[in-house]
Image (cartoon, rainbow, N blue to C red):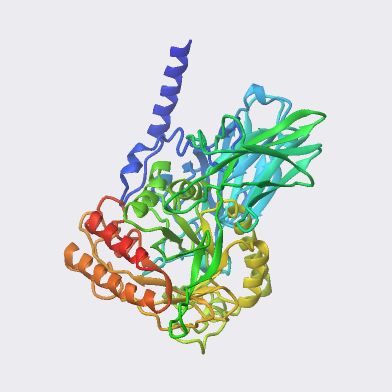
């Protein structure tokens, strides 16, 4: 019987492979490893694991039709969770604001789920998603970067085939929605648009009585206490939280605490805390983790259990020691009370074959591993939000993350000419990159300000569980910048445990913790105020095109002169590093090099876009980066 099941599964996989053909263009090595019957099969929410789930990734029917038309029939198949514009979707077509992208597929529920509620989860869908199950509309969601789910139990048939249908509409850069580097017509630092499902879709059974929705851990270093707040819905008597050591914590799914708990507590009103006398703190050098198990009890019985984890670390404004009145004391970033020079790459998280979506989990992990191997201790996640597994790997591997909010506009892109003239006019604000004076806000309609707050709040709420994140960045280079003090206040209220870099390289209002200068290609600190942490949020961008590993063959570029050899690239990189050491002595508290990989026509990555070629000697690169970090 087992052999028969194996043969049937192999037959289904073979049929799926025949039905899916990736599009043209540059590919990564991981593209060849994709099983179209089960792409990205890993558990998608490693910070909160339940045993039972069903992955809905794979081939779905799709149609791209005028936005006002109703879906009647499919025009082909698309490989979920790769967006329609990507090669790995098998579609590789732009959708645009005049059209809607429709998805449809069927599934059967496992018999053992009977008697439980069923949640339909979407990791992320860009931008507006409307969802039907068996012809009944179950809800809609706006925002391209955050997970959402619906309880679909009322709409399920008692048995047999169930059908889910999704309609997606995405205006990209034609309006003020958060969209990051996406534009209708890609060029320069602006890339191919992403439309539709781009993270895992999955089903999960939960108790009809009550279930855990989320939890939020906060470490208080001064009192040596870990507080846990649990959010749950339904009727239950209490939430029991157990704290575990790191042994057996990590599995292929995610958190997997095992053994005897170190301690446990009842979350009265959803809150509990643990006094930890000898805490094992998290840092990039020692990424120590603690396991969590959260259970809901009703009438003495456990009705829901999730496995989670956290890390103990604090982030603060620190300062140099001042041995005498003739010595300058500059503000620094404190990690666990220790002055730390955070140094790492601008990481955009784009893929030549999957665009927003890494081909496999191993690919998603790869860039983080390389960053650490090269001696860096942080990553600036630039104008994009990643799937939960990316932040989990940063927690596990040990990489501090500065998290950007995807921008809602850009003031300088030539693509403004392709937009509605009124939209283009409102986006043309002034950016004063080398001065504290002269900058101006974008003209953002109130509707889109409200949407910005909604999406930024959802992003923070979804990501604050990951302790690798140390800095929030609401704005970049004045793109869509508005009401900065109010946005900083909003961010602080959402999460007071991290530092706020109010406007990376943008227009400063002195309302956050950090002042962030950008300067290409060489590093420079043209803005400085001793009352704040002063950082170099972007520099470098040294271009070196590697034939055979390019998105396109000509018009490739980097900041400044394109390098002629790997040796020239590395020599200048090292020269810039020596300059950084001087800036550190005079107050530079952190630096970000552009960038981890090439992206589309930008050839300024340490690696090529397909991740095949590292353009520098890796041992020398590591030694240089460690020397910069240690110079503080």
Quadrant of the rendered image containing residue 56: top right
Relative to residue 500, is residue 436 depicted above or below? below
- Residue nearer the viewer, 124 or 286: 286
- Residue nearer the viewer, 313 or 338: 338
- Residue nearer the viewer, 626 or 448: 626
- Where residue 355 sits in the image (x, y, percent)? 42, 53
Relative to residue 270, is residue 433 depicted above or below? below
- Where residue 27 sits in the image (x, y, percent)? 32, 48
Furthest-bottom residue in view?
438
Furthest-front residue in view?
324
On the picture, is 102 further left or further right than 252? Answer: right
Q: Is residue 483 visible?
A: no
Q: Quadrant of the C terminus?
A: bottom left
- Residue nearer the viewer, 389 or 4: 389
- Where residue 543 sits in the image (x, y, percent)? 27, 67
Name the residue at 43% across, 75% down: 413
- Where residue 525 sits in the image (x, y, percent)? 39, 80
On the picture, is 317 further left or further right than 35? Answer: right
Q: Is residue 12 visible?
A: yes
Q: How many marks?
A: 0
Quadrant of the rendered image containing residue 518: bottom left
Name the residue at 36% across, 66% down: 593
On the picture, is 448 further left or further right than 515? Answer: right
Relative to residue 373, is residue 109 depicted above or below? above
């Amino acid at each position: 019987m087992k052999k028969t099941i194996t043969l049937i599964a192999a037959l289904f996989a073979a049929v799926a492979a025949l039905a899916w053909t990736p599009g043209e263009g540059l590919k990564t090595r991981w593209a060849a490893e994709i099983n179209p019957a089960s792409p990205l099969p890993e558990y998608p929410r490693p910070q909160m694991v339940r045993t039972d789930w069903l992955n809905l990734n794979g081939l779905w029917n799709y149609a791209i039709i005028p936005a006002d038309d109703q879906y009647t029939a499919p025009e082909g198949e698309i490989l979920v969770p790769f967006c329609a514009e990507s090669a790995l979707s098998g579609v590789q077509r732009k959708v645009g604001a005049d059209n809607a992208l429709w998805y449809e597929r069927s599934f059967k529920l496992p018999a053992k789920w009977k008697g439980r509620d069923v949640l339909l989860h979407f990791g992320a869908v860009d931008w507006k998603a409307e969802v039907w199950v068996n012809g009944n509309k179950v809800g809609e969601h706006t925002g391209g970067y955050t997970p959402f789910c619906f309880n679909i139990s009322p709409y399920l048939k008692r048995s047999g085939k169930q059908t889910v249908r999704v309609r997606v509409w995405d205006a990209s850069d034609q309006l003020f929605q958060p969209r990051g580097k996406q534009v209708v017509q890609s060029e320069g630092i602006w890339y191919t648009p992403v439309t539709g499902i781009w993270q895992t879709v999955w089903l999960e059974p939960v108790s009809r009585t009550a279930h855990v929705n989320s939890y939020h851990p906060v470490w208080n270093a001064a009192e040596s206490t870990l507080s846990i707040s649990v959010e749950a819905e339904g009727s239950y008597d209490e939430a029991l939280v157990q704290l575990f050591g790191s042994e057996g914590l990590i599995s292929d799914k995610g958190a997997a605490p095992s053994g005897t708990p170190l301690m446990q507590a009842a979350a009265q009103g959803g809150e509990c805390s643990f006094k930890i006398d000898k805490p094992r703190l998290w840092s990039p050098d020692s990424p120590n983790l603690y396991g969590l198990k959260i259970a809901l009890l009703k009438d003495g019985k456990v009705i829901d259990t999730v496995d989670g984890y956290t890390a103990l670390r604090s982030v603060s404004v620190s300062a140099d020691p001042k041995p005498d009145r003739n010595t300058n004391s500059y503000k620094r970033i404190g990690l666990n009370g220790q002055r730390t020079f955070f140094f790492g790459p601008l990481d955009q998280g784009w893929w030549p074959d999957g665009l927003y979506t890494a081909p496999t989990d191993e690919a998603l992990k790869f860039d983080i591993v390389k960053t650490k191997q090269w001696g860096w201790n942080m990553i600036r996640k630039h104008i994009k939000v990643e799937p939960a597994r990316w932040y989990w790997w940063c927690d596990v591997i040990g990489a501090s993350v500065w998290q950007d909010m995807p921008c809602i506009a850009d003031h300088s892109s030539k693509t403004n000419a392709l937009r509605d003239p009124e939209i283009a006019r409102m986006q043309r604000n002034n950016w004063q990159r080398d001065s504290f004076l002269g900058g101006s806000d974008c003209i953002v309609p109130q509707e889109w300000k409200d949407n910005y707050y909604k999406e930024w709040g959802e992003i923070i709420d979804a990501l604050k569980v990951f302790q690798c994140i140390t800095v929030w960045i609401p704005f970049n280079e004045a793109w869509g910048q508005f009401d900065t003090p109010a946005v900083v206040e909003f961010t602080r209220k959402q999460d007071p445990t991290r530092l706020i870099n109010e406007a990376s390289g943008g227009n400063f209002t002195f309302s956050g913790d950090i002042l962030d200068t950008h300067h290409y290609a060489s590093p420079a600190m043209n803005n400085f105020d001793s009352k704040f942490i002063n950082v170099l949020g972007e520099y470098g961008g040294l271009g070196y095109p590697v034939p055979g590993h390019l998105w396109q063959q000509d018009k490739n570029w980097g900041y400044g002169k394109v390098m002629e050899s790997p040796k020239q690239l590395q020599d200048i990189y090292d020269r810039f590093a020596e300059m950084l050491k001087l800036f550190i002595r005079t107050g530079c508290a952190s630096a970000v090099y552009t960038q981890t990989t090439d992206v589309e026509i930008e050839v300024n990555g340490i690696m090529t876009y397909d991740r095949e070629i590292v353009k520098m000697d890796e041992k020398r690169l590591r030694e240089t980066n460690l020397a910069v970090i240690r110079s503080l």
